[in-house]
């Protein structure tokens, strides 16, 4: 395992040389990711990344979980997750989408897709031959429009992209066996998750998130428990624990420094919190991960 001495660096979105800054970036290459080094240091991405691979080898880590790169597969990640790669060589299409893309009113339905709404479920999707043929055709149209813009460029680019994303969403739902709510599901859970993502280091109780969402604490907890099977505090603690694991796994920062970074008043309280949720202390977790 490689540690970083300070904050985990972020990786900017790669851009087509002739393109102005935009909400969507598309790249197709016979050497999409070619990392012959044994390890590429962990980093964060500030965008949603979808990789549709025609060939693939090596391992791709998202947070602390490894995935094997394989041909005819989809890999995806969301902003702020920590990435690392081991001896990766792939070809295919990469699509980068900024958070602003999903914030557009016209893309409200896309926010409910499983790789946006439920990124914790999996970051890899194996595609059947018929599915892959359909997606490859959509990717070819998307890449061609992106690289050779003409009249109505944005309209066609976004139309192809919507069809591609919705098709991928359908495949995800099918492979997950209906475990994920469909696009018509209530969005309170998503709004809570967005609030936790922005404030988990500073807002630490149900009442604070209830005020943020203009609801009573009891109503918020009741609805969230019905929708997700978890309480508001469980969602908050899961997000705090995830960040704690990232920092323990990918940096050399002390337990005390990590505790303060996550808003805990002292390292002892943070250690009790971590052990209650994982069964081990932060130092034991770090040592066991080496």
Image: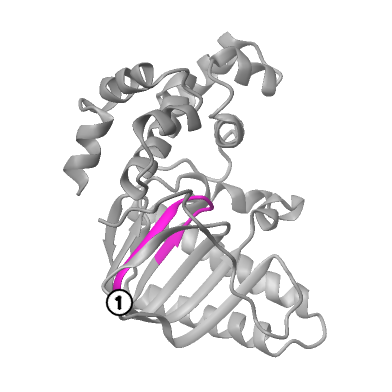
Where's residue 142, x and y in %?
61, 80
Q: Residue at x 46, y 52 (%)?
A: 8
Q: Is 168 above or below relative to 200?
A: below
Q: Is residue 40 left or right of residue 15?
A: left
Q: Would residue 28 be counted in the magenta stretch? A: no
Q: Quadrant of residue 143?
A: bottom right
- Measured from the top left, where is residue 212 in percent x and y? 68, 23
Determine which residue is flagged by label 1: 37
**Is 76 or 80 nearer to us in this picture?**
80
Q: Residue at x 43, y 32 (%)?
A: 257
Point 34% across, 56% down: residue: 175
Q: Is residue 116 above or below residue 139?
A: above
User: In the figure, 83 relative to 157: above or below?
Assistant: above
Position of residue 287 in the picture relative to residue 247 (left or right): left
Q: Nearer the viewer, residue 289 or 136?
A: 289
Q: Is residue 44 left or right of residue 220?
A: left
What secondary structure is marked by label 1? loop
Identify the residue at image location x=64%, y=11%.
216
Instruction: Specify start and end residues of the magenta stretch as a single range.
Output: 75-88
In terms of depth relative to the viewer, which is nearer, 62 or 126? 62
Determine if residue 274 is in view. Answer: yes
């Amino acid at each position: 395992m490689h540690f970083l001495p300070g904050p985990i660096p972020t990786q900017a979105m790669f851009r087509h040389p002739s393109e102005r800054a935009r909400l969507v970036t598309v790249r197709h290459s016979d050497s999409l990711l070619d990392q012959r080094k044994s390890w590429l240091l962990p980093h964060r991405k500030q965008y949603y990344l979808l990789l549709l691979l025609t060939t693939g080898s090596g391992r791709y880590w998202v947070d602390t979980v490894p995935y094997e790169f394989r041909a005819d597969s989809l890999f995806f990640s969301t902003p702020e997750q920590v990435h690392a790669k081991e001896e990766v060589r792939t070809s295919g299409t990469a699509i980068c989408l900024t958070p602003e893309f999903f914030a557009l009113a016209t893309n409200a339905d896309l926010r409910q897709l499983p790789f946006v709404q439920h990124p914790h479920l999996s970051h890899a999707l194996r595609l059947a031959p018929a599915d892959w043929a359909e997606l490859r055709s959509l990717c070819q149209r998307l890449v061609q429009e992106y690289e050779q813009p003409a009249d109505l460029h944005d309209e066609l680019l976004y139309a192809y992209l919507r069809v591609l994303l919705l098709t991928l969403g359908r495949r995800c739902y099918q492979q997950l066996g209906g475990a994920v709510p469909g696009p018509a599901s209530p969005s309170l859970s998503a709004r809570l998750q967005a609030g936790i993502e922005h404030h988990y280091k500073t807002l630490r109780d149900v009442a604070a998130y209830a005020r943020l969402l203009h609801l009573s604490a009891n109503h918020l907890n009741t609805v969230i428990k019905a929708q997700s099977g978890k309480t508001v505090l469980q969602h908050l603690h899961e997000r705090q624990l995830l960040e704690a694991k990232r920092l323990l796994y990918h940096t050399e920062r002390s337990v005390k420094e990590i505790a303060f970074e996550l808003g805990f008043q002292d390292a002892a309280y943070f250690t009790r919190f971590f052990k209650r949720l994982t069964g081990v202390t932060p130092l034991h977790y770090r040592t066991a991960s080496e």
